[in-house]
Image: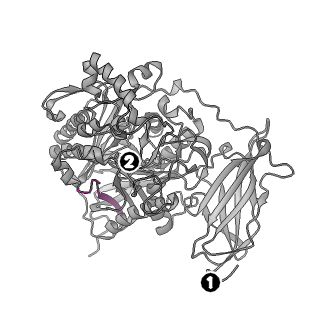
Amino acid sequence: MPETKYSTDRHLVGRAIADITGEPAEVGMLGYGKADQKTTGIHIRLRARAFVFVDPISDRRVLLVVTDLPLIFSSITQEVLHRLVQRFGDTYTESNVMLTATHTHCGPGGYSHHRFYNSSIGFRPKTFAAIVDGIVEAVERAHEDLAPATLRLTHGELREASVNRSRAAFDRNPQEEKDFFPDAIDPQTTLLRIDREGEPVGAINWFASHGTSMTNRNTLISGDNKGYAAYHWERVVEGVDYLADPDPDFVAAFAQTNAGDMSPNLDGRPGHGPTGDEFENTRILGLRQYEAAAKLAAGYMPRMAGSIDYRFVHVDLSAVTVSAEFTGDGREHRTGKPAAGAAAFAGAGFDGPTHWKTFHEGRNPGWDVLSRLAYRFAPALRDVQAPKAIVAPGRLLNRLGPYVQEIVPVQLVQIGELYLLGIPGEVTITAGLRLRRTVAAILGAELANVLVAGYTNAYIHYVTTPEEYVVQHYEGASTLFGRWELPALQQIAAQLATAMHDGNAVPSGAAAPDLSELQRPSKTTPPPDFPPVGRNFGDVLTEPEPAYRAGEQVSVEFAGAHPNNDLHRGKTYLMVQRRDGDRWRTIADDGDWTTTFSWSRGPAQSSRVTIVWHSPADATPGSYRIRYFGDAVKLGDDRVPFSGTSPEFRIHDEDHGK
């Protein structure tokens, strides 16, 4: 029997999408640590998906924003909160706002206020503004979208979208925990579906797998596998037009959990598994996440009861005294100042090495010797960091400038029967299991309903178990606050869960300082634009063929301008159009999987823009064209928009020749 309108609605929910794509040219990408991986264009745009959940009885609300970003830094969180206070007063605060990243490794960097993450990039005001503006825009739309809704929650398993990239470290964990993950992966996929009047209008999926299907050789902006999963559900399945639909009928987010040691490169090397093509791997791994979520959405999903609640605290993670209850060895320990180990500079082998060729995962003999000498004379340091081969001591670096964060946010959010523990780092699956069990036991919740929301509100690198830490693979060497970092976070999580269970408030503590005034923007202004000699901006330099079979690739090259002159946020640099009677119908733009927008510098400060359209195998036969939209800035002139249009070309059925 169909539900009566609003008869089972227990919450108000708003959802929205906005563009957060940063600079598509000459900006270092964030994630792989490769100085030469700089943006040269766009494959799919990056987006923020905002969800507001309100309990109409208590009037408590939670804002969850899932962003197609490499990382969330405190710089972004602080500015977004500042803007939300200006717009909404005390409706959205640090306590009830959760900003989280999907952890793509192919987004532009330069938006942190800590130098370590901008070292080869510099601070990029345009990218920073695009991210903040887009997140705030998504929140504003979600706020206006609030309406009665039914929330439904369910879980499943997905075993073909991740592999453990640090098996030697995982195997050091107790047998009981290894038995919980018999394949050394976390297969749980969780779906929260949002219904209005009995119809789905939104979904959030959580699954643990790194955003590293695209390799460190790629220089086109991409949301990686989770970005594709969301795109596929929204655009391909539900028909959302990102340019024409500012308030789409369906919003789908694919969020991260404890993905610290989970890789999508199923064959154990970058860009491999299930195929040897990184673009196809990205599509397949994203499609598998979508299919698992869609299967859950199509099945029986019980209506979720429960209230909205949250607890939040700032913690100086460099100075936590951890009780014996959480350390596992029966003794009290302390965390210490952040320090990166030698293996942290090597990168994770499954997903791609860094440019630091002298470092390796595991043993680094020279650095090992130096650290052992240091530990001999500093027993307190030894208890915190050994056996890490320390290369980058955060105490020293932070005296020189703000390199890494020490005061960090930890958050616990309740949405009905679902609990999200916001951790500002990359949590391995076993570390995540310990955190989840800690919270579930105190709240009396089902373990499956307690998730670690990694990459949330700030960034502290990795969180490993003390057993994994000893192996000093990439993840352990990147656990900055030492061997007892996870037990410290368990202790904090227990405090938040206890306060939520008992209905008590938690003092938020002193926040990390706002470092915005210390930023020195890199030289981000592109040089003046000039078209190639004898050409005008927008001229076609390489024409398409007169005709193609459906499924073939179409390529057009234009006389362009530097794309950073205008990021076209919420718009597009290109359109693929099909003639429909006496007008042209746009069928794809630069946010679509089937297109790529590539920029390169030509002679004499000219720019060449190449637009590629991979025509679908089922493309409608007919006449097509490709349009390019650019913005030129000459010496002393204002920005001047221009456009270019290719000659028409035909698309035929696969059964017909050209």
Range covered by the magenta-colored residues: 182-196
Horizontal and vertical percent position of residue 457: 39, 39
Per the image, label 2 sits on a secondary structure element best described as strand
Determine the image quadrant of residue 495: top left
Tell me the number on the disc at residue 64: 2
Front-lying residue, 297 or 454: 454
Horizontal and vertical percent position of residue 413: 29, 44
In the image, residue 153 lies in the stretch drawn in magenta:
no
Going by the image, does 619 lie left or right of 641?
left
Tell me the number on the disc at residue 536: none
Q: Are marks 1 and 2 in contact (CB under 8 Å)?
A: no
Which image quadrant: the C terminus?
bottom right
Q: Earlier in the sequence, mark 1 or mark 2?
A: 2
Which image quadrant: the N terminus?
bottom left
State the predominant SS element of the stretch in magenta: strand
Horizontal and vertical percent position of residue 70: 46, 44
- Against 299, residue 479 (above or below) is above
Front-lying residue, 43 or 307: 43
Going by the image, does 634 lie left or right of 615?
right
* Residue sitting at x 37%, y 43%: 98
Residue type at mark 2: give it. Leu
* Residue sitting at x 33%, y 70%: 298
Residue type at mark 1: give it. Asp
Horizontal and vertical percent position of residue 519: 54, 27
Determine the image quadrant of residue 591: bottom right
Around disc 1, counting alpha carbons within 10 Å, would you say few (fewer than 14), some (14 to 19), or many (20 or more)? Answer: few
Going by the image, does 319 lie left or right of 142?
left
Mark 1 = which residue?
655
Whether residue 201 appears in this view of the structure is no
- Against 626, residue 337 (above or below) is above
Whether residue 539 appears in this view of the structure is yes
